[in-house]
Amino acid sequence: MTAQAAAVAEPDLIARREGAVGVIRLNRPKAINAVTLQMFRDIDKALDAFEADPAVSVILLEGAGERGLCAGGDIRALYDSSKVRGDLGKILWREEYILNARIAKFKKSYVAFMDGIVMGGGVGLSAHSRHRVVTERTKLAMPEVGLGFFPDVGGTWLLSRSPGEIGTYFGLTGQTMNGPDAIYARFADAVVPSSKLAALREALTRVRAGATSDEIKTIIDGFATGERSGPVAAMQSRIDGWFAHDGMQDIVAALQRDGSELAQSTLKTLSEKSPRGMVVTLQLQRLARESSSLEECLVREYRAALQVFASDDFREGVRAAVIDKDRNPKWSPSRIEDVTPEMIAPYFAEIGADELMFDKTK
């Protein structure tokens, strides 16, 4: 077989044991490892195998290629299904969210190399890990509001636990975190220079059987820079003042009252997002603050996601960003003040037999 044929034959998800490490590699580098439904299923099967294998002490999630761990879920496939009123959203998000919850509770140490781009579904696979490693190349974001959606995959749980209103800011603006930002926002644990990832990876493969989480942390810390906060930390007091409100109109008004360049650029960013998506996102994050578990947030996100899947805003957001790439979505409604409680209520309604259930045996 030629090298080219071998590359073609490689699966989208590679799972194998290397020493003490059960490696899970997202392997769609041309798509920045965007995750498909089948890949979620293959990750779940890999976790079954690694959990049962006494030779595996650590799980390592990594992405193929140089561009990033994962740019998110397969948005184009979801768009195509939504257009024909299909059921991919219902199936994919159910399996994805259950997997997110499993990762958060996985018994063996789960290490995620969050190098390069980490967005959307990639956050769900990595930011619930026990040990979350970022680098100087990390660009982490949850830009879903720009697609008429909201930060899902447990994003509302994660964002609601960031300091002050940092999570509200990142959730509504979709702005990108660098590695130290991600640690400050509690999406990551250690900055390791990308040049040291290979050495860290090698060290993990040599850990003893049954190594504890503390032992894994000590190994990672040995390669880490010690950075704990990035540029966003310096903006905390201003962000807290602007985003402390529970209504989108109040947040916009607070930004409008502030004539600073940062406030004006933040306003411009918000003006490009789905008004309905922002209102739903803000309400989900406020509810997440009162939640006691990731699972509780995932159930709420699943209800809202099914409503998003049926909405024109989702299809229009994906069209403008991914299909036509004109970056000019026509939101419905087009103004925050026109988003009514009646429009939002279905996103928070229980859905009966379709409710998300978690397998407590895993």
Image (cartoon, rainbow, N blue to C red):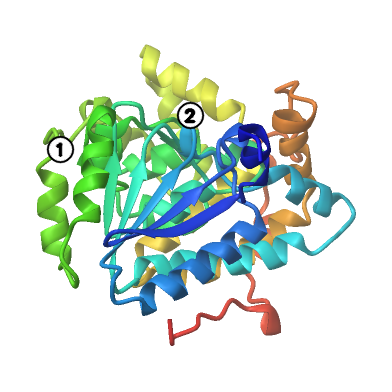
Residue under circle 1? 224
Looking at the picture, does residue 350 appear above or below residue 307? below
Q: Amino acid at mark 2?
A: Arg
**Mark on residue 94?**
none
Q: Nearer the viewer, residue 71 or 180?
A: 71
Along the polypeptide, which appears first: circle 1 or circle 2? 2
Residue 213 in view, yes or no:
yes
> Is the N terminus in the top left, top right, bottom left or bottom right quadrant?
top right
Mark 2 Cα shell of 10 Å, populated few (<14), some (14-19), many (≥20): many
> Is the C terminus in the top left, top right, bottom left or bottom right quadrant?
bottom left
Residue under circle 2? 67
Q: Secondary structure at mark 2?
A: loop
Residue 254: image quadrant is top left
Looking at the picture, does residue 304 appear above or below residue 138? below
At x 51% / y 80%, what residue is drawn?
358
Q: Nearer the viewer, residue 199 or 273?
A: 199
At x 9% / y 53%, what residue is drawn?
218
Looking at the picture, does residue 358 appear above or below residue 29? below
In the picture provided, is 13 more to the left or to the right than 80?
Answer: left
Q: Amino acid at mark 1?
A: Ala
In the picture provided, is 7 more to the left or to the right than 299?
Answer: right
Q: CA–CA distance between discs 1 and 2?
A: 21 Å
Q: Nearer the viewer, residue 59 or 277?
A: 59
Residue 108: image quadrant is bottom left
Residue 146: image quadrant is top right
In the picture provided, is 138 more to the left or to the right than 209?
Answer: right
Q: Secondary structure at mark 1?
A: loop
At x 22% / y 35%, what residue is drawn?
192
Residue extending furthest right? 84
Residue 134, position as x, y percentages in the image: 30, 38
